[in-house]
Amino acid sequence: MRAHLDAIRPELNAFVYIREQALEEARTAPEGPLRGVPITVKDSFDVAGLPTRCGSRLRSETPAAADASAVAALRAAGAIVIGKTNTPELLTSYETDNFLTGRTNNPWDLDRTPGGSSGGEAAAIASGCSAGGLGSDGGGSIRIPAHFCGIAGLKPTPGRIPTTGHYPSLGYPGGLVGVVGPMARTVEDLRLLFDVLAAYDPEDPFSLPARGLTTETPRVGVWEQFGSIPLDPEIRDAVRRAAHFLGADEFKPFGMDRTPNVWAFLFNRWPSSIVRKTIEGEEAHWTLTESLGPADPPTGEEVILMLAQRDRMRASLLRQMRDTPVIVMPVASIPAFRHRERRWTVEGKEIGLFQAMMPSVIANVFGLPAVTVPMGFTASGLPIGVQLLGHPFEDEVLLDVAARLTACKPSPPSSRT
């Protein structure tokens, strides 16, 4: 453990580690499936004795009195918490940077972002600082950093993994799109973490005492791109390779065009007035301010109509997925981008950040499980992942298919930055 902590790469600025506490935990770790395994935790989870800052000077420096439910579960299984990982301010950006600890860099290219908001977690795991850990996902915040950094990440069905002790709260309304999930270098490790974390928690209003549903040899479909949004050719090739390997049939759902608009309302428009009040009179970091919605709150009628629209679209998608429990699709339209980059030309079309990340928000809007599986690298050495989308509460089915897909992954390049 001591040698492991000494090998941490400071140029990534991915996390703050707690050396002596970790060494003491390693001496006294309980028996369990994760005994002695070093893990990291996104700084949006309470860890007893440490403040939960979420990358913001606006958050209290008072240490948390107790572990978040998911952190407690990992420790009970013998895992050693070696530190907390960096986030954008209040988890609101696809880049990881803030006034407290600064910018996190991608371990494959220090000039590029590891993504957000679980970017510090992805960078720490990808670079070998930890074997795996905890992230949260409200709009691709686990899956996009996993795609950018070449690791695996699961956004589970809401209710499968307790969210108690996460900031901001993932009760209502945040839990309509946000969940807690594991991240690891391999799908095998991801499954081990999920098995430890999946549990019922009466303090979490979304939590259900549900066992995972199973489907024998599920039929797989491929949703190659979202609408007319262009896709990087190397990512398209990875999606096609994954689809071919899994024997996927073409899947083109209809009626989903407004899914990103619903997500933007639930994730941004609805809470924006509360966020603005929180930062009023304070200096907020650009990772927070660039994504702020309007100051006026939506009306009750607007909220009801948007939730009703979401439910109709969800029912329609699940009807179309009835005979296709697993869908192969992109995580995002692009690989890891350079810090502060916001426009790209893809297949001859110019797209922005919101468009590039659209494939990831589908799972958040409709409460479906989704997992990023590493699928190789671009010609320039950047990681590529593909996304598997599944039926609600069939997380185990999704992870089984993900495990099969790892056999399709080519070898990594010979060196990294």
Image: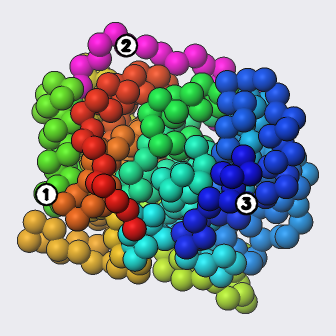
Q: Earlier in the sequence, mark 2 or mark 3?
A: 3
Structural crowding at the residue carrying mark 3, measured as other residues with C-alpha within 10 Å and reported as few (<14), some (14–19) or many (≥20): some
**Residue 319 vs residue 296, the one in the foreground:** 319
The residue that disc 2 covers is 215
- Quadrant (top left/top right/bottom left/bottom right) for the C terminus: bottom left
Q: Secondary structure at mark 3?
A: strand
Location of residue 197 with respect to 379 vertically, above or below: above
Location of residue 373 with respect to 174 vertically, above or below: above
Question: 340 left or right of 138?
Answer: left
Q: Are marks 2 and 1 in contact (CB under 8 Å)?
A: no
Q: Nearer the viewer, mark 2 or mark 1?
A: 1
- Where is residue 162? Give x, y as percent: 68, 36
What type is the residue that disc 2 sits on? Thr
Question: 191 left or right of 228?
Answer: right
Q: Earlier in the sequence, mark 1 or mark 3?
A: 3
- The magenta stretch is 200-220
Q: Are marks 2 and 3 in contact (CB under 8 Å)?
A: no
**Residue 268 vs residue 193, the one in the foreground:** 193
Q: CA distance from mark 2 to mark 1?
A: 32 Å
Q: Residue 120, labelled with which disc?
A: none
The residue that disc 3 covers is 17
Q: Residue 233, labelled with which disc?
A: 1
Q: Going by the picture, which residue comes out furthest to the left?
A: 348
Location of residue 357 with respect to 189 vertically, above or below: below
What type is the residue that disc 3 sits on? Tyr
Residue 167 at least partly seen = no
Q: Secondary structure at mark 2?
A: loop
Residue 280 at least partly seen = yes
Q: Quadrant of residue 204?
A: top right
- The residue under the point 35% across, 36% down is 389
- Where is residue 109? Give x, y as percent: 38, 69
- Where is residue 32? Give x, y as percent: 73, 23
